[in-house]
Image (tube, helix red, strand yellow):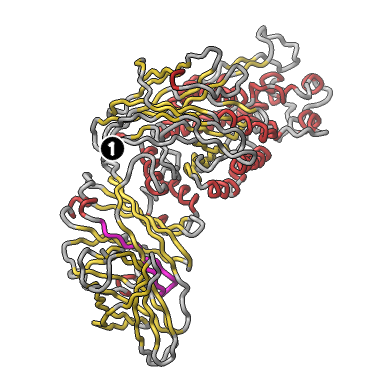
Amino acid sequence: METRGSRSLFMRKVNKFALLSLLAGICLLAGLSFQSSSASQEAVRLQKPLEHQVTVTLKLIQVYVADKKGNPVQDLGKEDFVVYDNGQAMTLTEFEKHILAASPQKAEPQPPEEKIVPTVLPPAAQVTVMGRKFFLFFDFAFNNQKGINKSKAAALHFIDTELIPDDEVGLLSYSILKGLSVHEYLATNHQKVREAVEALNVKNIAGRAENVEEEYWRRAQEGDPTESGANPVWQKSGFQLGAERQESKNLAQNFILKMTALAKALRYVPGQKNLILFSTGIVSSLIFGNQAGSPTGSQSGGAGYRAKFDPGDYVLRTQYEEMLQELSAANCAVYSFDTRESAKVPSLFAYDEETFGINARDIFTVGGVSQSPVNLLKDDKITGLYSISRLSKVTGGKYFSNIGEYQKNLDQLQNLTGSYYVLGYYISEQWDGRYHEIKVDVKRKGVEVRAQSGYFNPKSFREYSALEKQLHLFDLALSERPLLQTPLAFSLSALSYAVGEGTRLQMLSKIPNKVIEKFAGKKIELVALIFDENENLAGLRRTEADLTKYRGMDIFFASGSVLEPGSYKCRLVIRDLETGTGAVASAWANVAKKAFTGLSLHSPLLLFPESNFAYLEAEAKNKDAGAWKDIYPYDRAQYSPIIREVPKGSPKVFAVVPCSMTGLVQPNIVLAAWLIDSVTGERLPLSFSVLNKTQRENVEIQFLEILLNDVPPGKYLLYLHAEDAGSKTMSYAQTTIIIN
């Protein structure tokens, strides 16, 4: 699913969240890598290509209403709401009420109590249900090991007890080396997300900034011991400490910029997003400043004591506020779980370590005697409390101060997000990327309303940032029903064979001309992905091509991988890199174990006489004798592969049937063939003749003509049976065939 980078990366075996990590490498310059399987949409658009055009759009808005005590208000009707879009009062045509009475383990979620749908809809428009979207976000840069461990326990508890089947959940993380990564992107398959959480590695933790700040401001208050020459050789100088503090600011800036980029990309993900952040937060004094000592400059602190005032970092503060604005504009509410408390385990020797160990204070010095044993731990200016709590407040989320109480806090989060209203109104959609400000009022007094602050009109794919294009690709490549567009569809099938080194899977697809005509640009990418039974990525291949030169004909595309035996899901994504138009095809395939002796019948390749088509193939990393062209030879100027569906009215088809022979003396392979009706299970005889036989080392390849005159239309399994007349060893193979 990568869009850029070296081809060597595309051949690696990686699990599914390693696929997203590969994208992290591709997006390294942007510092971000980005699964969704829901049809929930903020805007239900007419079925349209991605060109500029004006169309009628249904805008859906999620609204949360609470009383003065913070409890959800659940008895409002459509008439109680007024929605303003850019200051204009809108006519509400849709209204839904969603209420979760308790967590899923305690009670089943209630269906919507009320739903009003207009009697007349614009042509081709449809109404969809808007569900909850959650991102679990693990911050490794500003955190600690105990905090991460507690965070993982909290995330697993949330997945196991708070989610309902229709909820979409994704998993993000941020680390200094890898930047911002998405391990899973908005999936209703909660088990996959759970496995991804369990696989998170605490080794990514950095967590130095708070320690540096503690020492920096301690020095500011007590003075720099190096000035008096009494400092031990192992203690850091003021210059070194200042350099480390600047490094902490650089780390904070990187985090802020990556979060801002993420927020901008999430603008185009429909609906309200709830980001559950596990972090200690950026140390507040790095952004907003701090003060140590007396403003009058009193020297009561002893030798070397000085008053110090830091007004904060203007650049960091400006970028931090921009991050808050972008998250709000993207309708992304941040629910912060502060992991500081989990690290504050009372220690009998904590005061001694602070006084006489790490900082080498002498008990007879003013600094050593006057030091408060709890002062540092309670100084929230040199922790992330303010920055992380403000993040939640501004974005409409909530701050939870102690990760150790995650069960109670997650119940509260469920209460806050489990009851909401969906309001809908129609607008004329414009492709200009402009921002619309939304204001939602409730006529009832004494309630608090929380809703998205606005939305962005769609824009041309050419104007997407690199990060937005990555998000667009994730949506196409990993979603069964992509959110950002309705992709074009075409057919895909696969061959399984075992020759040379290992067992292989060859993806085959015929891209019809009607699909090719939809791609207006000259720069097209084809991304072939293969997932195993656990939905881990087993193979990936990417190819760029110019499809405009193939207009007026179909294209046959092939891509192969060496795989272990097992069942696999194949997916081919085509994307116009100029317009964003996408097309997707999927198929299941089984790779059988390689037979070390006897016969091994490989998947048959069905052919149809056709000449007006072109070939396009993903370039193999290593060319060898096991290449599929050697195992499935045929005249490409006369025949075209059949991808599942036989052309209507065809009286016959052809087939290339390879069979490996190992340890057999003078083998004589006899084939038999029949059809199984996929609906009734009825077995139908099949007439065929062998037109040609060829030998490639220990592989015999038979070219068959199969007659279909007496076969009624339907979907069938084509079974082939091979037997060696001498040794009586046998082998089977099958493929799906649709006869019109």
Residue 508 shown in magenta:
yes
Image position of 75 (left or right of 521): right
Q: Nearer the viewer, residue 686 or 268?
A: 686
Image position of 576 (left or right of 75): left
Asked whether residue 247 appears in the rendered view, the answer is no
Q: Nearer the viewer, residue 657 or 529?
A: 657
- Would you place residue 91 above or below residue 701 in this image? above
Label 1 Cα crowd, 10 Å radius (few <14 / some 14-19 / many 20+): few
Image position of 611 (left or right of 374): left
Residue 425, image x and y in percent? Answer: 36, 25
Report the amino acid beneath label 1: Ala
Residue 648, image x and y in percent? Answer: 21, 63
Q: How many marks?
A: 1
Residue at screen point 38% across, 18% down? 84
Asked whether residue 459 appears in the rendered view, the answer is yes
Q: Which residue is mark 1?
A: 124
Residue 80 shown in magenta:
no
Image position of 8 (left or right of 383): left
Q: Residue 393 occupies which quadrant of the picture?
A: top right
Residue at screen point 49% across, 33% down? 112
Q: Nearer the viewer, residue 216 or 560?
A: 560
- Would you place residue 227 above or below residue 740 in this image? above
| Magenta region, main secondary structure | strand
Q: Which residues are magenta?
A: 495-511
